[in-house]
Amino acid sequence: MAVQAQYQSNNILFFNSSSSNNKNEQERKEMDYNLLLHQQPPPLFFSSNGSAMVAAAADAKTTTRKRGREAQAQNNVFSLHSQLHHHQQQPPPLVSTGLRLSSSADDDQDDVFAQINQHHMQELDHYLLAQGEQLRRALAEKRQQHLRALLAAAEDSAAKRLAEKQAELDRAARRAAELEELLARLRTESMAWQAKAMAEQAAAASLHAQLQSAAAAAAAAQTGPEECCGDRAEDAESAHVDPGRSGICRCCRVEPASVVLLPCRHLCLCAGCDAVTAGECCPVCRGARTGGVQVFLS
């Protein structure tokens, strides 16, 4: 409270000094104006009397000296007034106390400005934090949307690839089924052709055996005068078929002949005699044999 009272008295003193300064400034202006009036030269009067002019000049000189001394005194007074005015215009010194208080009102303004600045900084920090949080949420949402879009695109691509692979598997399965069906059909046809070929081969062997049997019968029937033409008769016997003669086995004379000997192609043995006389010569032409084919006659 004592400090505040002292500050108020200093303010009153400062205001009083300001009013006195204004008063002194006005007085100084009036003195300058009076000095200018006194420094004007006296008027000159021209007359026929020369002594009057000399006297007027002497009086003017004396007056000028007096005014010079007065002007010097006035200048000294003016310098003192200016020093006092400069001293009074200086700001009063700040009073420092143990409580760290100042007599200037700038400290309060600085405190207010500091509080306002701190408040603005806090608001700016809160705004920046809110904007940063909003930006972070927006970026997170964008990232989630991007990831969802990538996942959806990957799922679509995988579904398309799976559909294509499934279609390829279906086509491959149909092709495999077609190939299996074709293979079964070809196997059936092959077996049919094999059976037909075997039947044709059996028919050919039977016909050849009949020819050989007929030729053997014709050769056995020929005698005497035909000996000179033995080879020709044998060929004729091989080519001629006697339908009335029954083929009897030339070895056992009981079973019908059913085996054609190779390479002479004589139908002259039954199956049992062929197995017994394996490796022996042909009973018709006495030629060496290398094998035999069994035929079935209808």
Image (spheres, helix red, strand yellow):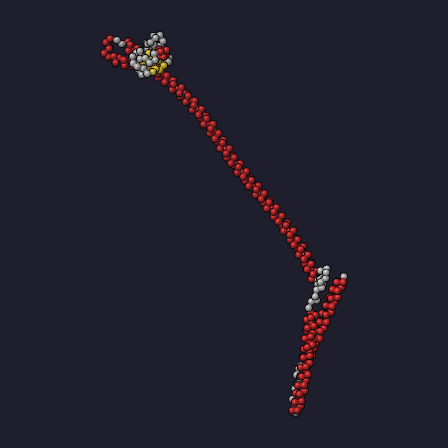
Residue 84, can we see it? yes
Q: Position of residue 295 (x, y in %)?
A: 36, 14
Q: Which of 264 and 198 is in front in this view?
A: 264
For the N terminus, the quadrant is bottom right
Which residue is at 61% across, 46% downward? Answer: 137
Which residue is at 35% across, 11% downward? Answer: 276
Q: Nearer the viewer, residue 59 or 215?
A: 59
What is the tally of numbered marks visible in this picture? 0
Q: Position of residue 26 (x, y in %)?
A: 70, 74
Q: Give the vertical position of 52 relative to 174 (above or below).
A: below
Q: In which quarter of the image is residue 27?
A: bottom right
Which residue occupies the extreme top position in the image?
254
Q: Give the vertical position of 61 relative to 159 (above or below).
A: below
For the C terminus, the quadrant is top left
Which residue occupies the extreme front position in the image?
98
Q: Quadrant of residue 46?
A: bottom right
Q: Which of 95 and 229 is in front in this view?
A: 95
Q: Position of residue 177 (x, y in %)?
A: 47, 27
Q: Position of residue 152 (x, y in %)?
A: 56, 39
Which residue is at 59% across, 43% downward? Answer: 144
Position of residue 78 in the picture relative to residue 157 (left or right): right
Residue 33, can we see it? no
Q: Give the vertical position of 4 relative to 54 (above or below).
A: above
Which residue is at 44% across, 25% downward? Answer: 183
Q: In which quarter of the image is residue 238?
A: top left
